[in-house]
Amino acid sequence: MVFCIFTAGASARMGLRSIEAVRPYLLDGTHEELSSALRGVHRYPRARARYVIETRDYLQRTCGLRLRQKLASFADPQARRDWLARERSIKGLGYKEASHFLRNIGFRGYAILDKHILRSLAELGRIESAAPPTTRARYLEVEGRLKRFADEIQIDFDELDLVLWSMKTGEVLK
């Protein structure tokens, strides 16, 4: 989850470097320790450190950091993502990063609608504009278009956005 918090508004590479910088402080580091470790590594060291601390404290209080267990308790995949994106005490995750996190930990059926995917969909004529969706409804609409496209071309939905992303970036990071 921290990786996804770090990649919002930044690159995947910056997220990876940031994780390595803060790894010793994730479970019990202070805001100052995290922000100090992020200086020179992340664009927003103080804000991202605050997001990590506030999210960690909330998850510790509410589920004892047993996040996978909490996520598995949702019968509805949309409700699972909605909780991550809408819970005010989980900082730095909107629909894109909530989808990113869920996909990274093995949940399927979520599109990671980043700028690379949106540009690809616009170039393919599947959406009118590559502008990021700003509402839940718009996110789900674009995600639905990606799902229909995957069905049409008979490619697994969860693999299609990785293919589109790697075509734009020229790499697969993880």
Image: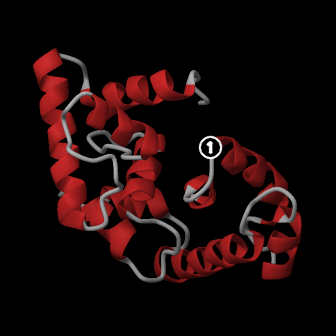
> Image quarter for residue 39?
bottom right
Residue 75 in view in this figure: no
Residue at image coords 16%, 28%: 149
Q: Secondary structure at mark 1?
A: helix
Q: From the viewer's perspective, tell me whether residue 15 is left or right of residue 88.
A: right
Q: From the viewer's perspective, tell me whether residue 119 is left or right of residue 170.
A: left
Looking at the image, is 148 positioned above or below residue 30?
above
Residue picked out by circle 1: 12
Residue 34 in view in this figure: yes
Q: Nearer the viewer, residue 119 or 58?
A: 119
Residue 17 place in picture, x, y as percent: 77, 47
Q: Nearer the viewer, residue 159 or 115?
A: 115
Bin the neighbour count of mark 1 within 10 Å (Cα to Cα): few under 14, some 14-19, many 20 and up.
some
Residue at image coords 64%, 71%: 52
Residue 90 place in picture, x, y as percent: 48, 75
> Image quarter for residue 164?
top left
Residue 75 place in picture, x, y as percent: 19, 57
Total residue callouts:
1
Q: From the viewer's perspective, tell me whether residue 157 is left or right of residue 55.
A: left
Looking at the figure, which quarter contains the N terminus? bottom right
Residue at image coords 67%, 70%: 48
Color encoding of the figure = secondary structure
Q: Nearer the viewer, residue 106 or 116?
A: 116
Q: Amino acid at mark 1?
A: Ala
Residue at image coords 76%, 69%: 45
